[in-house]
Amino acid sequence: MTSAPEPAQSSPQTTSDLAELKRLLNQVSDVNAAASLMSWDQETQMPPDAARVRGLQMATLAGLGHELFTAPRVSELLERAQPEQSGPDQSDPQQAETDAALLKVTRRDHAKATRLPTAFVEEQSQAASEAHHAWIEARKNDDFASFAPHLSRMVDLARRYAEYQGFKDHPYDALIDDYEPGMKAAQVKAIFADLRDRTLPLLRRIVAAGDATDYSVLRRPFAAQSQRQFGLKIAQEAFGLNPSFSRLDESAHPFQTNFSRDDIRVTTRFDEAYFPMSLFGTWHETGHAMYEHGVSARLERTPLSRGASLGVHESQSRMFENLLGRSRPFWQRHFEEFAQAAPEVARGQDAESLYRAVNRVRPDLIRVEADEVTYNFHIMLRFELELSLLEGTLAVAELPEAWNARMQEFLGVTPPDDAQGVLQDIHWSAGLIGYFPTYTLGNLLSVQLLDAAKQDAQITEQVDRAEYTLLREWLVQNVHQYGRSRLPAEIVQAATGRPLSADAYVKYLEEKYSDIYGLS
Amino acid sequence: MTSAPEPAQSSPQTTSDLAELKRLLNQVSDVNAAASLMSWDQETQMPPDAARVRGLQMATLAGLGHELFTAPRVSELLERAQPEQSGPDQSDPQQAETDAALLKVTRRDHAKATRLPTAFVEEQSQAASEAHHAWIEARKNDDFASFAPHLSRMVDLARRYAEYQGFKDHPYDALIDDYEPGMKAAQVKAIFADLRDRTLPLLRRIVAAGDATDYSVLRRPFAAQSQRQFGLKIAQEAFGLNPSFSRLDESAHPFQTNFSRDDIRVTTRFDEAYFPMSLFGTWHETGHAMYEHGVSARLERTPLSRGASLGVHESQSRMFENLLGRSRPFWQRHFEEFAQAAPEVARGQDAESLYRAVNRVRPDLIRVEADEVTYNFHIMLRFELELSLLEGTLAVAELPEAWNARMQEFLGVTPPDDAQGVLQDIHWSAGLIGYFPTYTLGNLLSVQLLDAAKQDAQITEQVDRAEYTLLREWLVQNVHQYGRSRLPAEIVQAATGRPLSADAYVKYLEEKYSDIYGLS
């Protein structure tokens, strides 16, 4: 019923093409939303015995979404549809622009989706499933050798994926494009080199300065229910996560997902002996949530109705988590509330001591636990290794050694085992090569965007007292509303007046941590 | 991808037909499961602003499920597929039987789904949506006249639906068949006449006997959280609702839904000043849940993998809610636990007084609040009116008067307004004509099945001390496992040795309530 062609109408054929295309894309979007709901439900609500059939159901929905999107009718309509002649909409220039973007981005997505032979997609999916299980075992047993053949296969599949998609300069370009459309390996290389050269000295000065702070306060007891209440209250009142369009649940690994801009699900996890995990985790996911909620309703149920890229997404989550949530004004404003929620943690503390405690810099082994200064070195390391693996200048067997050498070089630490080293992340086992750089690109962009927003004196004045209503408006206006209708580079240029660089982030780190660590 | 035909194989063509058909039916089942999950989520979890887009998404999934099921390829395969030659399965007689049932039932479903013109389905859906809104307003304003034209339209649509589906004796046969496959209006008439003739005198004797019981105990405070804990503990420990395959949530109207036999969702609602609502509601839905969980895993992801009919379903929910949950042994066994959960309710009470309080018989206006004796009169009234409306012997405008006259005749009460009379139920506004009788058929069947199970002395011995493990096994063996692979009448005959009748239920009521009300 839903995919039957419209009966012939008196309006021009092109109107009908675009309208029919939109209807088919709405259908794809709805199927994908159902698949996402199944996934959210699986992580947060589902009874355990349901897992096996749920896996089959999710595979069906994923296959159906792909099948509907790559249907011959969609190809035909994408070729024929024209935004210029879009009938009743042509008097609305913004609608015409949206339609043009819809066609452009959907053609790009469609080309990517149809360039891969079905046999390749199935092989990749199967290999990833096997590699994922192998990785779980390998990490448990600290046995890289058992994972190595799977990783070799994932690297080989990534190379073949890049061949299918095509690239000009480097196969990595075809990979990163899925996560950060338009980004190239050469750009990442240049930005990362600059970042490394300018933050490694800072890190060394911080380490040399020593640290007498008592961090045990972070491990004082804080009941999960109270963590939830406090974290959610801030997410709602300070960051705008209104319960009318969102909810917070618990899951093994925190994430944000959504089934429309008004149906946003955030998850977190609680450690009663380490509250920063849930608080900053909740606020991080809230940043992702507010981005998705800010996408224009015009883009509803289309391929454009989500964030522009992983990097731009991460800029929003990191802004809420770090630039705001780990800022001095934030803790000054919320310390009393915090103390009420966590009296045992707050005993003998004040806003400044807590601000200090949640901003510890310490070179260490695990990426997801890293601070603002060391985090990007974890990413740079992974990016360099991915490039070498793809280029064939590094063999998978040599990976642990190369990992450990770079950890020593960047952070001055060496993993005691591969479980805490090269095996720590899930990404490669899932075939996600080209994904890691977006974390650092997001960090850099978070500061570049905040600096741009603070060109407005009123926003600066608000942010300095931990009030974010105008900032949120600015973000919706300059970033969120566009969804995927503009490329990340276009959004960054228009919002900040220049391309993405490390400049703002380096300056931010130097100012914040020179102050914290009393560097001259 | 998922619907692509299998590559040619060396096995006979029919094997491939059946296998392909099953794969397509799995796909339909998965899409329907996703639609059900969207619905459950909407009732229990979803943020309010998500409602509009969720409606569109659910419509897409419903349309897609219908489209996949009625696809030409499914028709072809249904014609060609043969269970007898089903290749590797032919050595397994039970599998061959399952396959035969799958083809038979699916052909029946498919014929029903394809007999209706799309325009009719859309008209019905649109009319139901309008009628539903009109009903809400009419009930709020006690204004039957404003609902009357909508109800006339629903009756007309029901007649046309019956014409499309075809029938031999009465258009009602085509309607009830959707809820109670194989049941005919004439059978319902005969059973109901017998039930009425044999229980109306009992009701009159009960009313005449008078009632000095203090029912205020039912309105004593019982915290929602404690109701939940106690109700769920019983559901789990006594009735088998294992959290490994189920969960309990809160919703405005209690229901059971599931996305596989191991993924069952039960909901309830709480009134802190009237605990029977949540307790008996939870146990009622638990009966539905255990039925769905008991369907054989062989039927997984096929059209057979749910209960045989609404009536058989209701027999299971009513058994748990009433025959067990409102039995004397149950309250004897669980009174102490209950007293711990609800000390204020239990003060000065004992098992017998609570057993007495939860079994009040009182002719009253509202079906959903009716007791075991009066409930079926609410249903008989609706059935008679539905027949008259369909036959055209009663005009919609005359309905309130006819309703009130029958209420007086059966129960000796007259609704003070239509909101508490003819407008109380949602069913007709949704076009559900032919649905009501299944409630009473379920009540009758609940006792007929329990009596049959208790032919086993061990089951009787267990049930008499409120222990239900053997009974549950019996139900799985004799009812649950078949899912839709057998017609209700086949299940009833095989399980109880005779067709459904009012006999067992009448005897049950007479014994239970003669005892409670001290009738001679």
Image (spheres, coloured by chain):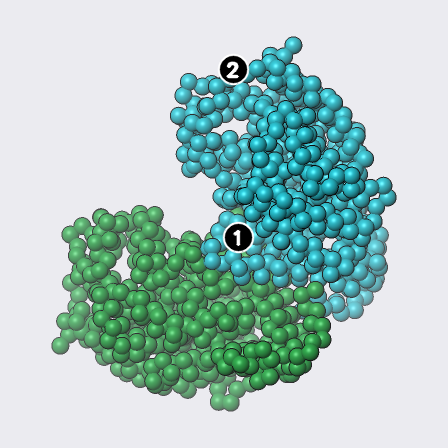
Chain colours: A cyan, B green
SS at mark 1?
helix
- Please state, as top left, top right, bottom left or bottom right, where the N terminus of chain B lies in the image: bottom right
Farthest residue toward the top?
Answer: A520
Determine whether, in the image, residue B213 is placed left or right of residue A170: left
Q: Earlier in the sequence, mark 2 or mark 1?
A: 1
SS at mark 2?
loop
Which chain does the residue under circle 2 lie in?
A
- Numbered circle sitting on residue A112: none
Q: How many numbered discs?
A: 2
Residue highlighted by disc 1:
A42
Compute the Cα span from label 2 to label 1.
44 Å
Q: Residue at x 57, y 85 (%)?
A: B84
Which chain does the residue under circle 1 lie in?
A
Image spot of residue B286 (x, y percent): 38, 62
Residue highlighted by disc 2:
A212
For badge 1, the amino acid type reads Gln
